[in-house]
Image: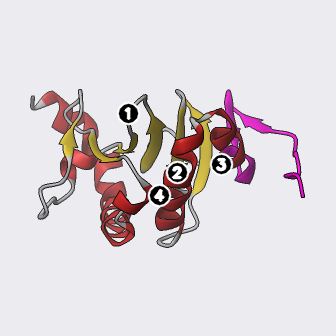
Amino acid sequence: MPPVMREDVRWNGAIVGTDALDTFLGGARPDAGPIIVEIDAAIRSVAPLDSAIKWRQLLYGLDGDFHHWICAIAVSKNRVTLNFHFGGLLADPEGVFRAGTSKFMRMLDFDTPESVDAELIARRVTDALEQLEYFKANWKRIQAEG
């Protein structure tokens, strides 16, 4: 049976809602699809986050807040990356985060569906949700501290 095509819902220039995952998958490399689905399932196992496509990424935010997004899935030529907006504030006892280009950004890279550690993702998303209010209240001060 062919997939049901739904009209995209847009908010502030982003595709939002359940259609966002379908739309994102439709634009991704075919081999990245199963990895994206595994990551999405791990994220959604923690909380019913909203999703939107913005900046060529599938963003996840709490209560539609995509300015202070929690994490985002991005696809490159060689991997699928889970970006954490303020991952620099999160614990990384396993030492698996890759630093991003900003003080806050941290990433987890995946190259096969089997490489997706759903429990690790769930722990980091839980940590991010617990730190969200602190990040929102303090990010400007932390950024200014250099």
21 vs 126: above or below: above
Camera sees residue 69 = no
Looking at the rendered structure, the secondary structure element under dot 1 is loop
Q: Do callouts 4 and 2 mark residues in contact (Cβ within 8 Å)?
A: yes
Sequence-first disc among 1 and 2: 2
Residue at the image point whose x is 71% and y is 50% from the top: 17
Q: Check residue 36 in the rendering and tell me which mark sits there, or answer none.
A: 2
Magenta residues (range): 1-20
Looking at the rendered structure, the secondary structure element under dot 2 is helix
Residue at the image point whose x is 28% and y is 55% from the top: 134
Report which quarter residue 27 is drawn in: top right
Camera sees residue 59 = yes
Q: Nearer the viewer, residue 15 or 111?
A: 111
Q: Nearer the viewer, residue 44 or 49?
A: 44
Q: Check residue 78 in the rendering and tell me which mark sits there, or answer none.
A: 1
Residue 127, magenta (yes or no): no
Q: Amino acid at mark 4?
A: Ile
> Which of labels 2 and 3 is toward the front?
2
Q: Amino acid at mark 1?
A: Asn
Does residue 82 appear left or right of residue 91 in this picture? right
Q: Which residue is mark 3?
A: 21
90 vs 119: above or below: above
Q: Amino acid at mark 3?
A: Leu
